[in-house]
Structure formats: structure tokens, C-alpha cells
């Protein structure tokens, strides 16, 4: 082949290689933009609804609370002296898993109520772990976040015809010693986190991450 032809062929091959190198790899590289939410906002999709009461990552993630509530004891009388180890102050789903894995939840009505809000699969196959993106009873600190934002949450609850949060005492899932668990309430605009006998009947709401 003539030298001029070799030079032209080499140049064409180099241009072709450089074109291939410049093509984007892995398809669409645009970042996924998540929807963001504000405290007090109503969250809903095809299978889930709640009210946002805590956010992080610019509102892309956080905690929501159930629209409904119920009054129940933390445990039944015969189990008040049972120290379960569900003592996590930060992650209520950890407390739920401890009780779900080691005890009959019918003895712990507050925990059972939140557990039964999850999928048919979880309900009919016991001792499956509850994750942060499933319903559970809030820990004492998660309950604190909810009560700190009770005005915004209650305004949205009221607008949807749901029971509001003000002036009620709520159980957390955090056990404190053998006979008591942590509760929270608003009293004259003051947030109180205390402890009470586990057989007392207080309100409970379920929470979960989004």
C-alpha cells in the first residue's frame, strides 16, 4: 500500500477510536431527583398515607405518622415484670423486632397494633424483621420529634377529619427498666417525656420512614 494511503487509513482509525471514547458510558447519567416534603405535609401513594413530622436530606427522606391512633396498654398485667430489652431510644423498629422475635405480641398490645399495620406477608409469617420503611411504634426520641411538631401535624390531621395529637399521652416503644416504658405528651406547650407502668392505657400512633 502506498505511504499516503497508509497515513490516511491510520488517521481515520484514530478519529474513529476517539469518537468511541467520547461516548457516555452506562446510558443515562442524569441524577435521580426525589420528591421533597415539609413537616405537616400529607404523604400518600397507592398503598400508603401519613403526615410528615421529621425530615432530612433536604426533605427527601424523613418520618411520617399514621392518620389513626388507638388507646392500649404497653403490655398486659401478667407480663409487667418481664424485662424485654426493647430499650433503644432512637430506633423504634429495633424495639419492635426485639419484641416480635422473642415474645407473643398479644401480650404487648401497643407493639402488636403497629405490627398488624404491615403487609399480609409479615402478618402471616411471624418473626420477620420490621424495617424502617414499615410501620412501628416510635422510640422515645422519635416520639419527641413528633410532639415537637404537633401543631403542624395536627393541623393537617384535622383538615382530613382525623384525630389530632394535642393534649394526649402517647406510648413510645422504649422500655425503661422492668416495669415501665417511656411516654410523651404536650402539657401547656411543654414537651414531657416520662415513664409509666407498662400496664397503663395510653394512646399510640405508628410511624415509618419515607
Image: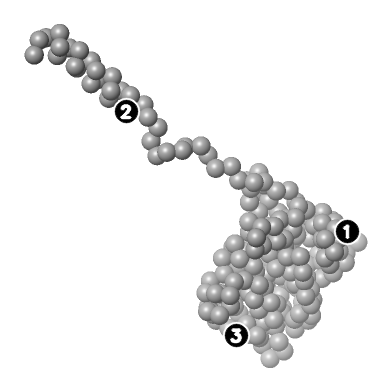
In the picture, the quarter occupied by the C terminus is bottom right
In the picture, the quarter occupied by the N terminus is top left
Q: Which mark is residue 20?
A: 2
Residue found at x 62% / y 82%: 105
Q: CA distance from mark 2 to mark 1?
A: 66 Å
Q: Nearer the viewer, residue 179 or 54?
A: 54
Q: CA distance from mark 1 to mark 3?
A: 37 Å
Residue found at x 57% / y 69%: 130
Q: Give above or below for 202 relative to 58.
A: below
Q: Give SS at disc 2.
A: helix
Residue 139 point in image, percent of width and height: 67, 66
Which of the 4 quarters of the picture holds residue 62? bottom right
Q: Nearer the viewer, mark 2 or mark 1?
A: 2
Residue linked to disc 3: 104
Residue found at x 54% / y 74%: 121
Q: Nearer the viewer, mark 3 or mark 2?
A: 2
Q: Which mark is residue 189?
A: 1
Residue found at x 66% / y 44%: 58
Residue 186 point in image, percent of width and height: 84, 63
Q: Residue furthest top?
A: 4
* Relative horizontal placement of residue 131, taking residue 44 as reference (left or right): left
Q: Give SS at disc 1.
A: loop
Pick whichever of labels 1 and 3 is earlier in the sequence. 3
Q: Nearer the viewer, residue 82 or 107?
A: 107
Q: Give above or below for 151 relative to 101.
A: above
Amino acid at each position: 500500500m502506498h505511504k499516503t494511503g497508509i497515513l490516511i487509513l491510520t488517521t481515520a482509525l484514530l478519529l474513529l477510536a476517539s469518537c468511541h471514547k467520547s461516548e457516555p458510558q452506562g446510558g443515562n447519567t442524569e441524577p435521580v431527583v426525589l420528591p421533597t416534603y415539609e413537616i405537616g405535609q400529607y404523604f400518600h401513594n397507592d398503598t400508603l398515607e401519613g403526615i410528615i413530622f421529621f425530615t432530612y436530606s433536604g426533605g427527601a427522606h424523613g418520618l411520617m405518622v399514621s392518620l389513626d391512633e388507638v388507646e392500649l396498654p404497653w403490655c398486659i398485667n401478667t407480663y409487667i415484670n418481664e424485662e424485654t430489652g426493647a430499650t433503644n431510644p432512637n430506633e423504634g423498629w429495633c424495639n419492635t423486632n426485639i419484641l416480635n422475635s422473642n415474645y407473643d405480641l398479644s401480650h404487648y398490645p401497643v407493639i402488636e397494633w403497629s405490627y398488624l399495620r404491615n403487609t399480609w406477608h409479615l402478618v402471616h409469617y411471624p418473626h420477620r424483621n420490621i424495617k424502617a420503611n414499615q410501620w412501628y411504634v416510635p422510640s422515645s426520641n422519635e416520639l419527641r420529634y413528633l410532639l415537637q411538631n404537633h401543631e403542624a401535624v395536627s393541623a393537617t390531621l384535622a383538615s382530613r377529619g382525623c384525630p389530632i395529637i394535642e393534649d394526649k399521652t402517647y406510648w413510645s416503644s422504649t422500655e425503661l427498666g422492668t416495669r415501665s416504658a417511656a411516654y410523651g405528651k404536650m402539657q401547656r406547650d411543654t414537651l414531657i417525656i416520662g415513664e409509666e407502668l407498662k400496664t397503663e392505657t395510653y394512646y399510640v400512633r405508628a410511624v415509618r420512614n419515607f
